Image (spheres, rainbow, N blue to C red):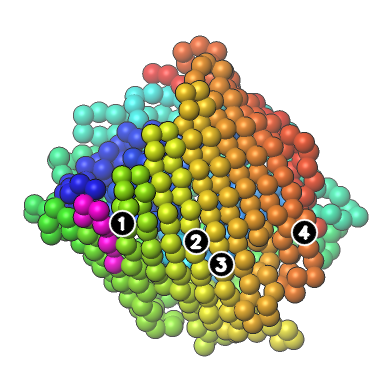
Amino acid sequence: MKYRSALNLAITASILFTSNNLAAADDNDIIVTATRTAQTANDSLSSVTVITKEQIEQRQANDIPELLNGIQGIDISNSGGLGKATSIYMRGTNASHVLILIDGIRMGSATLGTVSLQSIPVSQIERIEIVRGPRASLYGSDAIGGVIQIFTKKAQSNNMNLSIGYGSNNTERFNAGFNTRKENSQLSLNIGYLQTNGFNALKTSDPDKDGYKNASVSANYKYQLSEQSYLTATFMQAEGNNQYDDRFTPSNIVDADFVQQATGINYVFSAIKDWQVSLKLSQSKDESSNFKNGAANGTFNTTRDMLSWQNDISLSDTLLLTTGIDYQNDKVDSTTNYDKKTRDNKGYFIQQQWFGDNNDILTAIRVDDNEAFGNNTTGNISWGINLNSELRLISSYGTGFKAPTFNNLYFPSSGNANIKPEESESYEIELRGNATKMHWAVNLYRTDISNLIVYPAPTYQVTNLDKANIDGLEVNITLKQKDYNTRVELAFINPVNSVTKKVLPRRAKHTMRVNVDQNTGNWRSGLEIIIKGKRYDNTSNSTKLDGYSLINLNTRYPLSKNWMLRGKIHNLLGSKYQTANNYNSEGLGVYVSLNYSGD
């Protein structure tokens, strides 16, 4: 590995990245999530997956969970189709152990501790970066299993785009975008709307269709102040209504209005040579208003205000130091009477990246000071060594934690103000290979989690009781051929509650995903095969959910220079399966869309 100026890479890549000059995913793809600085995917010491704009368009997924399903290290549990409650498990950890960012803005409900990822529309997304393994040393709470960062659309050129789609379950979709670029500025505006009648989500004696509506808007602006400095502003909002089934009283008509919002302003500049500074002010909102038989049935609104100061200092051509402070204030506004409705968190972090000819070393440490539970210190260390020109061995160790939610601490009757954060230790070894037309990687890891927060019977009052041990193996192989690209992803996990010796619920112990995509010719098609092993629905492992397999097809055909016809078939064989007990999953689905893009 050649020496290079780490800061110059960070500055150049950040300008390129925010300008969206990146296209198809490969080992030279520039990523920013793993270290909070720009680096190529091949240089990263983390296990990373990048989903590009081209891949998003080709998959034609109706929501983010569908887009992520089957990616190595990720498992999905869904309660009945589009818009319904969905859990994302990364490397066998809990759904609350995955940090979700939108354009660097921390998302999620301060009461539930999770993100309604199913409510964030695919139509507003440019790109997704997935980092597996702990990243608490950079981001603080939540990043035990990993980080998923979503990047909204930016202006690539002066153009307009329009898309109209229709499909199974009376699913209607409309998206439009306007993009403009000038010498020193760029602006992207996008709107989207999706609605579906859905299908009967819950297996009951009173079947009905459970619909979903989502209206969204995003805006991104960038102004290049100088060669080394720029200002960006971002906004994304999705709001709508979700109908769902009351599993205890199926005859009830229940639904919820929701809002997901992210707003941020970021100023990046170089005060002096070899020193880049980033100042970011941001806010995220998660709002939910529930209704039963038309009457209000509870409101839970949370607001998260954040301020971040980050410094990237190039101490030499081979040493990059990153340090900063993150401030976060969480507020709860609810019809439920919480004992406390606000809390502050201050995080102080420092990271060093050393780049050698054949060795790279990363170390990081972070201290979080939270007014609800005090201090928590986390760290990471990674070492990568080039065995030869094609083989690389990487070893990593990291710690993480999950802060208790407002529900854990203060919910009436079940909350416990003395609850402790969940804590983790993770170990990982990766062997990575690169050849002219093939890239492959094998990852072995173990994660130990203590102080797991549970609600034990008969009091159901929250407490730190359980522990978990998770062992995993991941394999991915990418082949680039003349006419086709093929990617195979395998994951094997053994997620066990070390107290009860039971398998953690709703995690498949093995998964496989195969994608074969045509990359030449006008008429291009793709094949996707997803295979999931059995899982258990409950902590006692008394309810087993069978494994399943899906075959998905996608295609596109250019009608002219500006018009494109796209189509997909989801679940070609109509497989019947459940990822949450008694909740149906979508059967055979057919979707088509007409797309315009031009000046």
Left/right placement of residue 569 relative to residue 130 reads right
Evaluate whether residue 539 shows in this view: yes
Counting other residues with Cα less than 10 Å from the Cα at mark 2, is it few (<14), some (14-19), or many (20 or more)?
some
Q: Residue furthest left?
A: 272
Residue at left offset 42%, top offset 54%? 431
Provide the residue span drawn in magenta. Answer: 356-363
Q: Nearer the viewer, residue 284 or 274?
A: 274
| Residue type, label 2 | Leu
Disc 4 versus disc 1: nearer the observer: 1
Left/right placement of residue 184 relative to residue 435 reads left
Q: Earlier in the sequence, mark 3 or mark 1?
A: 1
Residue highlighted by disc 2 = 444
Residue highlighted by disc 3 = 471
Residue 368, above or below 306: below
Residue highlighted by disc 4 = 545
| Residue type, label 3 | Asp
| Residue type, label 4 | Leu
Q: Earlier in the sequence, mark 2 or mark 1?
A: 1
Q: Secondary structure at mark 4?
A: strand
Residue at left offset 65%, top offset 60%? 509
Residue 376, by quadrant, is bottom left
Circle on res. 231: none
